[in-house]
Image (cartoon, helix red, strand yellow):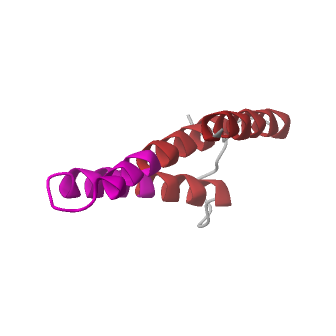
């Protein structure tokens, strides 16, 4: 769905795809690290921190991937919802 508006004949993808790729990469890295250190002698706070980060990066990747093909007003609205949700969770 995210590739619909993109012409793949160009050599460069938009910055949005770089952000999406980075968010997915970080989410899976946090999943892998938290699973491997879960059974080690590392402090529990580090394991839970990686679990929170994997959820954060997964949600970020979801929001970025869903809003790529839509107009600017929709992306701004989704960003506002993303920030508001993050603030509600934080507080």
x 80%, y 33%: residue: 77
Prevailing SS of the magenta stretch: helix
Q: Is residue 2 visible?
A: no
x 59%, y 67%: residue: 11
Quadrant in the picture for the C terminus: top right
Decide which of 85, 17 is in the foreground and name it.
85
Number of dots carrying numbers:
0
Q: Is residue 36 magenta?
A: yes
Residue range of the region highlighted in magenta in the rendering:
26-53
Left or right side of 36 for 24: right
Q: Height in image: 18 above or below 56?
A: below
Q: Is residue 52 magenta?
A: yes
Left or right side of 46 for 56: right
Decide which of 63, 87 is in the foreground and name it.
87
Residue 54 coordinates in the image, percent (x, y): 42, 48
x 66%, y 60%: residue: 15
Decide which of 14, 89 is in the foreground and name it.
89
Quadrant in the picture for the N terminus: top right
Residue 34 coordinates in the image, percent (x, y): 28, 53
Q: Height in image: 5 above or below 53?
A: above
Residue 87 coordinates in the image, percent (x, y): 69, 39
């Amino acid at each position: 769905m995210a590739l619909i508006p993109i012409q793949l004949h160009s050599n460069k993808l938009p910055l949005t795809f770089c952000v999406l790729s980075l968010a997915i990469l970080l989410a899976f890295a946090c999943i892998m690290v938290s699973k491997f250190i879960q059974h080690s002698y590392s402090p529990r706070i580090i394991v839970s921190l990686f679990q929170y980060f994997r959820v954060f990066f997964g949600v970020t990747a979801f929001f970025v991937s869903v809003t790529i093909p839509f107009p600017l007003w929709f992306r701004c609205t989704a960003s506002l919802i993303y920030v508001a949700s993050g603030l509600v969770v934080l507080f």
